[in-house]
Image (tube, rainbow, N blue to C red):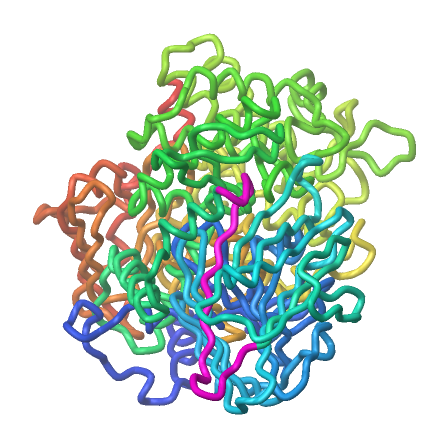
Amino acid sequence: MKNLKIASAFALSAIILGCASHKPQEAENQIPEPSSPGISLVTLANPMQGTDSKRSFSHGNEYPAIALPFPMNVWAPYTQPQSDSFYYQYSQDKIRGIRQTHQPSPWIGDYANFSLMPVSGRLAVTEDERASTFSHKNETALPSYYSVYLDTWKATMEVTPTLRAARFQFTYENPDNSYVVLDVFKSKKVCSVQIIPSERKIIGIACNNNGGVPDNFANYFIIQFDEPFSSYGVWSDGKTQPGITRLQGNHVGAFLKFKTTDNNRVGCKVASSYISLDQAARTLQTEIGDDTFDTVRQRAEATWNDALGRIQIEGGSMDQQKTFYSALYRSILFPHRFYEMDANNQPVYFSPYDGKVHQGYLYTDTGYWDTFRAAHPLYTIFFPEIEGEILQGIVNAYDQSGWLPEWASPGHRDCMIGNHSFSLLADGWMKGITNFDAEKAVAAMVHDANTQAPDFCKSIGRDGAKYYNSIGYVPYSNIPDDVSFREACAKTIEYAYDDFCAAQLANAIGDKAAAKTFAHNAMNYTNIYDPKTGFMRGRHADGSWNEPFYPDEWGGPFTEGDSWQWSFSAMQDEPGLINLMGGDQAVAKKLDALFAAEPTLRAGTYGKPIHEMTEMAAVNLGQYAHGNEPVHHLIYLYDYVGQPWKAQVRLRQVMTLLYQATPDGLCGDEDTGQMSAWYVLSALGIYQVCPGDPTYLIGSPLFDKATMHLGNGKTFTITANNNGPQEFYIQSATLNGQSDNNVFITHDQIMNGGELTFQMGSAPNYDWGVAPESRPVSALSKLNQ
């Protein structure tokens, strides 16, 4: 789609129709509404979505996550060696086991891992020896259940999850020499395994990690088998020790042999704890107890159907419904619980920040740089009880480490930029999620905003805080020995947004002094806008512009993007940014130009194209790089400039082209729920451009009807009459029966329950939602009133 000219909305309509027309005809057939009896929503979610990726090109960089919503532990098959963080690759034909995993991203890595694998006929313990060929035809993956037939061993392995435990089942065709192999992954620290034959049990400790943990970090696990062992042993470095029950080392394992002549099925239940073996045993009893595999599976399926059923959609094709529920599934896999339930059924956790056990809540394995944009706004609507626990955990992390977390896995990790914990805290408070210590949160914001990021982790505090606070921006220079900070423009833009969020929370609790300072600094984005070029760009500490400047150059003063993508990111003050850029018409033309531009790119300081660049060029939507987060709000800016019909067509285009419920069905890194949450909200027809300001912009609802069962027990319905692949333009709208020309809706209006109804059509309505009073005002200006 080179040189798309979006001056013509009808030309864009043709693009959308062309994109849809290649689909098989049956893909457009209507199916029964998921709310109908007999429709299990969990069967519509595909854990294989996004798994056909490789390091150089991402279709999601995902693995099939078998888990409950917001779990502590996830279970996943793996095809690659343990050292490869891209560990499930759909194109491969061998499986090495099912692992307990906590990995939020292959760029972050996994931790606290062990795996189970059945073998038969002969004992094979190392991952290369035990790896079995398999076919996707003999593989079943649901959020609540995974099964695969192992060709090499003529055996089937299955798993079904609870929040912190799981039930496994191994079925052997060959009754001779049936084994289960445990692999405690390689670690720099000493791990251990112990077999207790009299109790049909293995206990162990896994310690492997990729950082973000204290010295006393450990994952204590218990594996309880249903059947007695006929023999057993341990192994290390490929060498087995039959009859030995204990082993310690950097890479250890165990093997168990079973008599399967009369019963060819072996089951076990598994639980783990970051606190102790006693706690793991408690979890095993409370989450599984004596329940059978089928009982655990049924309960997991019911849990998923409840979670997915918080949004019931009608209309659309089978493919679209599968894509929607696959996206909703991905959206609520993160962040991971890090807390457990003690003997009094109270939450307790081992802190990765101070190495001590505390009462309360903690969540981890997520990066707020990604998820503040859509994932957490999604939780505030449908899972406010979870978001409340997350916010408490953020403040707890500050208590224990002296810093608010920004990218945790499980503790602080040096990844990405900004102080987007500010966003979560402010957005939650503004939406009535107030069960955290807001005064302490504001004090933490003041600390982090005024403190240089520590060397061990540049993603907490502020890199360049001294300059940002004194000259109003983070300086960047390519002159040797000049004052310069990596990604300085992106940091300035995001610090300014985060300052708005801090001002919102400070103002809400009556801290007027902090609110005033933060609100003032929220305008700092204006200091790196160059009116001559019309772009945000790097600026030296003395005020001069960094040269040379190319708007399509990645890296340098920007984070995983270029100036085209970052120049529209003053989310807290989009109307102010629009005025700065020359007004409605000028910005509309600039947005048009972004999509019409060639997808050129300069590698800049990256030295060579990174995968985000390659993926942008492949999508061929000009300089729009949906596979990375900085542009996720960008299409909705058409609402701010009085041209909402362009947002409507572009949103349908992105949803149609870049999301499918297939192994290659995502257009970039999924990033702990953000990529999917964008789709869920956009498919509903709403999107929060500025978290911290409880206002959602209107897009183009994908389905005929979406019934939203809200976290407060009420129901909000979005209906799109005359909706379809060719009818994506809003003609008119009513809110609770009253005519509504606004291109926005507030959080309170949604949470109060009701119905938003659209009349759709195949041609733009150039009158609906275009008046200045129909648009949202600047969130920052509302704060300063």
Residue 512 percent across, percent down from the top left: 42, 9
Magenta includes 124? no
Give the quarter of the figure containing the C terminus.
Answer: top left
- Identified at 91% across, 34% down, the residue is 480
Does any portion of residue 568 appear in the rendered image?
Answer: no
Of all residues, the one furthest to the front in this rendering is: 198
- Identified at 38% across, 89% down, the residue is 24
In this picture, which residue range is highlighted in magenta?
258-278
Viewer-side residue, 285 vs 354? 285
Give the quarter of the figure containing the N terminus.
Answer: bottom right
Does any portion of residue 722 appear in the rendered image?
Answer: yes
Residue 181 percent across, percent down from the top left: 62, 71
Q: Is residue 21 left or right of residue 113?
A: left
Of all residues, the one furthest to the top in this rendering is: 513
Q: Is residue 640 left or right of residue 258?
A: left
Viewer-side residue, 94 vs 554? 94
